[in-house]
Amino acid sequence: MIVGAGDIGIPIINYLSKRGHLLTVIETDEKRCKQITGHSDAAIFQGGGTNPEIWKSIETEKMDALLALTNNDQVNMEVCKIAKKQFGIPFVIARADQPQNIAQMKESGADVAICPAQETRCLFLNALESLTAETLYEDTTANFNIVKVTIPPSGSIIGRTVDQLGVSENCRIVGLFRNGALVFPTKSFVFKGEDRVLVSGSLEFVEKIVEKLRNVEVT
């Protein structure tokens, strides 16, 4: 079941329909409903995702998953509550337009909450910084991320130890890749150029360590 057939919903509807999934779609916009009818095999209900009359018309007992994909966080939260708490749909995925609403979306019943803006930000930053740093995971609500940093050939950290890096208690060097092997460094471990270092911890402190690791020695 999919609530919201906008810029995210329609491509997902088309994808799932082509693979033979049985779909039920709720969408307020008449033109989008017609677009779905012309390109996908789905039961379509025009109206709001929180409309109780529409929910009464849907065979919710046959639903194994629901995606709340409107661009309104409050609507998506209410849809999650209805799906999970009233009808017991086993797996609920929700779109969070604002990153700060991810936790509340999960409290409302979402098993997974995804913020497209946050995910897009990570993709663009990874593209921008791909030569030296890549964000592998980020959770702004929990103030936590994991970054992979490549030490440049002329990096200022080369020849220094993990202990000399000055890692705070809110940050950890969890491992690094050298010559194709994963290494779990001790405090006396010495960095080399081209080491790919995995750093995890709070956003602020990880950023500081990343800058130290990718800093280039000026000659």
Image (cartoon, helix red, strand yellow):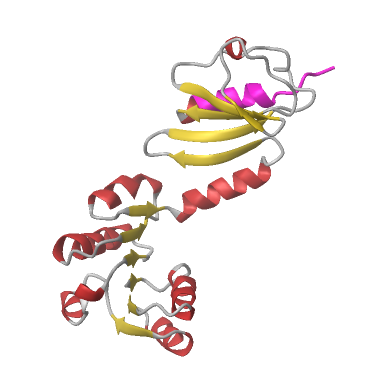
Query: Is 101 displayed left or right of 197 in the figure?
Result: left
Percent position of residue 108, x then y: 23, 53
Q: Which is more toward the observer, 127 or 193? A: 193
Query: Is 128 displayed left or right of 84 in the figure?
Result: right
Whether residue 180 is situated above or below residue 74 in the rendered picture: above
Please give the range of residues in magenta: 205-219
Residue 210 among magenta residues: yes
Q: How many marks?
A: 0
Percent position of residue 130, x then y: 68, 42
Q: Residue at x 48, y 53 (%)?
A: 117
Query: Is 193 displayed left or right of 200 in the figure?
Result: right
Q: In the rendered image, which quarter is residue 213 located in?
A: top right
Residue 218 among magenta residues: yes
Whether residue 148 is situated above or below residue 27 in the rendered picture: above
Q: Residue at x 80, y 18 (%)?
A: 218
Name of the residue lying farthest toward the front: 181
Percent position of residue 132, x then y: 69, 35
Q: Quadrant of the N terminus?
A: bottom left
Q: Residue at x 61, y 44 (%)?
A: 125
The kind of secondary structure the magenta stretch mainly shows is helix
Q: Residue at x 29, y 55 (%)?
A: 110
Q: In the rendered image, which quarter is residue 92 located in?
A: bottom left
Query: Is 149 displayed left or right of 35 in the figure?
Result: right
Percent position of residue 69, x then y: 37, 65
Q: In the rendered image, which quarter is residue 5 located in?
A: bottom left
Q: Quadrant of the C terminus?
A: top right
